[in-house]
Image (cartoon, helix red, strand yellow):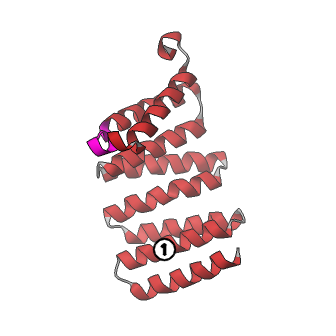
Amino acid sequence: ISQAAGDKRSEILSLENLINVTMEGDAFYECGDISEALESALKCVELCKDVGDKKWEANMLHNVAQAYLRQRDLEPALKAITESSALLDDLGQQLLRSMVLQTAIEILMAKGDATAALEVTKEIQRISKDLGKPSRQANAMLMEAQVYFATGNCEQALCWSVIADVRKSMG
């Protein structure tokens, strides 16, 4: 209906709801219907570009990245998450960017690039510190510990876990 009326913003809202249902809904997920979510997310990205809404475009690119990640199609996932992060950075949306960067860590680890994943954890920590969000900074430290653990560096993983626990208890 909204498509026939030419209301692109309503169409974006409708498609975003579809993506959320497709990606997070148990029935669709259990059926493995991620391709439908990806198709809708890609369409939403184009619609966002048409209406000039960069923040929604960044959100939709994040959804695209998550769908590609779930399909284990890592190069397009990394491209989409990089574009999403860059848009949010340009918009000054650092808190949202730090959340998007968590998906970047997942993608990089799936690609086996722990070095890049560690750099992203440092960026999340920096953003969180700049925003005065010690609990988010502690979460980023825990992500760093997970990366170290996944690469077999248990000593560093333990060290970052302890630092993160101390940081969380402080604020």
Residue 76 position in % (x across, y down) = 35, 47
Q: Which residues are drawn in magenta? A: 29-35
Q: Residue at point 60% right, 72% down?
A: 138
Residue 165 is one of the magenta-drawn residues:
no
Asked whether 120 or 134 is in front, the reply is: 134
Residue 14 position in % (x across, y down) = 50, 27
Q: Residue at point 34% right, 82% down?
A: 152
Residue 44 position in % (x across, y down) = 47, 31
Would you call the spot at circle 1 few (<14 residues within 10 Å), some (14-19), or many (20 or more)? many
- Callout 1 secondary element: helix
Seen in the picture, residue 84 relative to 17 is either above or below; the reply is below
- Is residue 154 rendered to the left or right of residue 71? right
Q: Residue at point 64% right, 54% down?
A: 94
Seen in the picture, residue 102 relative to 43 is either above or below; the reply is below
- Is residue 37 rendered to the left or right of residue 136? left
Residue tagged by mark 1? 144
Please identify the dominant SS of the magenta region. Answer: helix
Considering the image in quadrants, where does the C terminus appear?
A: bottom right
Residue type marked 1? Glu
